[in-house]
Image (cartoon, rainbow, N blue to C red):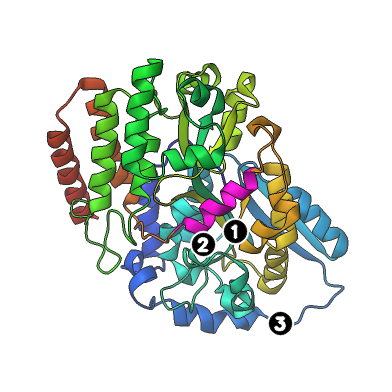
Amino acid sequence: MRKAKHLALSLAAVLLVGSLAGCGGSNNAGKDNTTKENSGNKEASTNAPATDKAADPAEKIELSFWTLGNVNYEELANAYTKEHPNVTIKIQNTGDQTAHHNNLTTALSAGSGAPDIFQLEIGFMERFLSAQDKFYNLNDYGAKDIQANYLDWKWKQASSVDGSFQLGLPTDIGPTVVYYRTDLAKKAGLPEDPDGFGAAIDTWDKFATVAKAYKDKIGKPFVDLTDLTYNALRDQSNDEIYFSKADGKFIGDTNPQVKKAYDFTVKGIQEGWISNFMLWSPEWGQGMNDGSFAVIMGPAWMAGNIKSNAPDSSGKWKIAQLPEGAGNWGGSFITLPKEGKHPKEAYDFIQWLVNKDNQLESFKTKGLMPSIPALYEDPAFKDFKDDFFGGQQTAVEFGKSANRVKPVYYGPLHDQTDTFFKNALKNVLEKKADPAKEWDEAVKQAKTLAERG
């Protein structure tokens, strides 16, 4: 799923989280996902099959499905109901991911109004893993039988630590890559082909050296902006980023990868090879089109944004791998809130919705990167060529990146904490603030939030 422009939760959302946790989730469920069996797991597992009875094939089943963003699930639902004429699927779609998840939080807190099926964005996963007793455990309906079909790290994002509870089935993912302008690479004397360009920047030290040389020769920044630069290194953390999955404590100040990401971004700001654009600004979009920078480090779904913002640069972009690994930004899961009266039929539909054929269709029609690694070697997937990216087989690069991603624990306070460090970098960029003082202030704010949280 493509991420919305702003990920920080509003005050209203924070209050709703508290309400949801109070209405049934474990009080320390933000940690339970990665440390111990959630206290709600056994209850959910025991209760779910009570409604799992054989349905009369002639019984009319109506399922409500809340979807998010630019997906092809309505078309797929129509195809499914043609093969299952007793099933009707009513879809409610929204492009506002915060409102989408807050609406479900409100419904679950009230005990009424939730849909049978809900598309859950990964950025909100921790909120709902804290209320497992409000969802059906998909393992009770056969999820274990299809687990091996999906990327292991993706599957585990919606699992309890022992695997006994599965909140959702995987849909798309957002593995991160390097998007670069071949015309600008040629002008700077850099390789134009993806393998050659990737080799020139395959360590972060080499990347910085190339970026500085580019700035000195071309007179323009090499990279688009601070946020995506910081994200690219931050998400290569080993297992954890800002919070310990063992006890939920803030560890961002002692995580070497977080400091590496911060210092690397500061270096780019001070040496002038990172642009001063803001993420999602019109100026950033225009910069893609007019060649204000050569590189964007972002997820697979960013390809759509580049195409929309930079039509005049069609054929000039290509995709290479990030230095030293990959991260993941975005992606979603399909879940079954427990208010639904037909979990068996709902599960039958969602396991069909996210199967190999349908994930391929979602990639072709909407650009949603599949979470099924078998597709990465399927000719129907890897032979897909994108004219905007110079006829490159873009799926191959996305697949390479997906296989490099390692699972990391985020924790429920990740987005708010991340904002502190992004603001620190913004102050360094715009106000020429002292990087060390900004780092210390971000750490102080993060620790205060963690203590209150």
Position of 389 with respect to 434 (left or right) is: right
Q: Secondary structure at mark 2?
A: helix
Residue 78 placed where, x, y %? 81, 53
Instruction: Tell which circle, 1 or 3, labels the residue nearer the N-terminal end.
Output: 3
Which residue is label 3 attached to?
Answer: 53
Q: Counting other residues with Cα less than 10 Å from the Cα at mark 3, is it few (<14), some (14-19), or many (20 or more)? A: few
- Label 1 close to label 2 by CB (< 8 Å): yes
In the figure, residue 301 lies in which quadrant?
Answer: top right
Q: Secondary structure at mark 3?
A: loop
Q: What residue do we see at 27% from left, 53% from top?
A: 242
CA–CA distance in space, label 1 to label 3: 30 Å
Query: What is the three-letter code of the residue carrying label 3?
Result: Lys
Q: Is residue 45 above or below residue 400?
A: below
Overall secondary structure of the magenta section: helix
Q: Is residue 397 magenta?
A: yes
- Label 1 close to label 3 by CB (< 8 Å): no
Instruction: Tell which circle, 1 or 2, labels the residue nearer the N-terminal end.
Output: 2
Q: Is residue 96 visible?
A: no
- Residue 154's disc is 2
Q: Nearer the viewer, mark 1 or mark 3?
A: 1
Q: Is residue 126 visible?
A: yes
- Residue 371's disc is 1
Position of 367 with respect to 110 (left or right) is: right
Closer to us: 75 or 430: 430
Image quadrant in which the C terminus is located: bottom left
Q: Is residue 116 magenta?
A: no
Q: Secondary structure at mark 1?
A: loop
